[in-house]
Amino acid sequence: MTAVEGPDAVAGEAGRVLDGRVALVTGSSRGIGAAIAIRFAKAGARVVVHGRDPQAVEAVRGRIVGDSGDAVGILADLTHGDEVKRLRAECEAQAGPVDVLVTNAGGSPVPPGPIEDITEEAWRASVDANLTATFLTIRTFLPGMKARGCGCVVTMSSAAARRPHPGSPVAYAAAKAAIELLTKDLAAQAGPSGVRAVCIAPETILTERNQQQIPADVQERLRMTHPIQRLGTPEDVAEAALFLASDAASWISGVVIDVAGGSVLV
C-alpha cells in the first residue's frame, strides 16, 4: 500500500511550482504573511520578506534560509509612496524584478463600534493601513509586470468585507471591500498585458496573536459558526495563495476566494 503524502512531501521537489520567480509578500514578518512567505520559499520562490519591525523580518528571513530557502528582508512603511518606491528599488537590487506580489500588509487598528463614534483619525488610519498601502504597492510594482508581459498580484480582503455585521470594525471592512473592487479593476486593466489579479478573503485565522488574544470559549463559539468546524490557520491561507500564484491558476483572475471554512456563502 502506498503511503499518503502529507504537506511536507507536497512542498518537496515536485511542489516547487514557483521555481525561478521572485515573490514579494508585504506584511510578512508575522501571521498570515509569514506563512505565505515560508510556503512560497518551499515552492522555490526567492522571497522578499517585508515589514516594519527589523527583528521580526529577520526572524522570518532566517527561518526560510535555515530551511534551505532563498529570502531577503526589506523594511518599508507602505502608506508613503516614496517608501514603496524605495522598496521596489531594493527588491530589484537584492532579489530581482517581482513576479508575484502579495499585498498582505494591513490590519484593523480601530475596534468595532457605531459608525458615528469613529473618529476621522481612526477612519484614515484603517483606510491608509489597508486600502492606501495596497494601492500604492500595486501602482509601484505593476508597470514592471506589464512591461515584462507577466505577473500575478494577490490582494488580501477579509470576511468582514463579505458580509455586513453590527459587530464589524466598519472602517476596516470598508477598506477591505474597496480592495476587492480594486483587484477586479486591476484584473480588467492588466489582463491584456499578461498580469493576473486575485483576492483572498480569510475568516478568523488562528495566528499566534489571535491565539493569545481570543479567549478559548470565544474560539469555540467561532468554531461552531463554520460549516467546516474548525478555525483557519495561516497555512490554510498560504496554500490558497500558492495555488493562485502558480501556473495552475493561469486562467483565474478578477475573483475573490473565501478562505472561510464555508462560513461565507455568497
Image: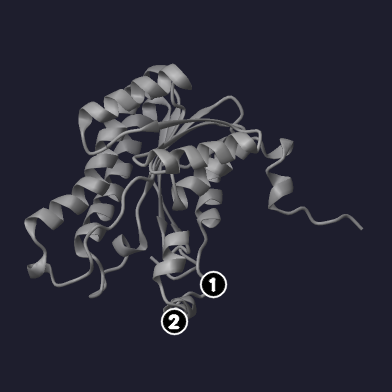
The way the protein has been coloured in the rendering is: one colour
93 sits left or right of 112 in the view: right
Q: What element carries label 1?
A: loop
Query: What residue is pinned by disc 1?
Result: 230
Amino acid at the residue labelled 2:
Arg
Residue 118 can be seen, yes or no: yes
x and y, in percent, of residue 206 in the image:
48, 64
Q: Is mark 2 on a helix, strand or loop?
A: helix
Residues under labels 1 and 2: Cα distance? 10 Å
Who's the residue at 26% across and 69% down the image?
A: 168
Q: In which quarter of the image is the C terminus?
A: bottom left
x and y, in percent, of residue 63 in the image:
58, 41
x and y, in percent, of residue 154 in the image:
41, 42
Residue 201: mark in rendering: none
Query: What residue is pinned by disc 2?
Result: 221
Who's the residue at 77% across and 53% down the image?
A: 5
Quarter of the image where one finds residue 204: bottom left
Q: In which quarter of the image is the N terminus?
A: bottom right
Local crowd at mark 1 within 10 Å, few (<14), some, or many (≥20)?
A: some
Question: Of 24 and 227, which appears nearest the observer?
Answer: 24
Quarter of the image where one finds residue 229: bottom right
198 sits left or right of 129 in the view: right
Who's the residue at 35% across and 58% down the image?
A: 158
Who's the residue at 44% across and 29% down the image?
A: 151
Amino acid at the residue labelled 1:
Arg
With respect to residue 168, does 41 lie above or below?
above
Q: Decide: marks 1, 2 in contact (CB < 8 A)? A: no
x and y, in percent, of residue 66 in the image:
63, 37
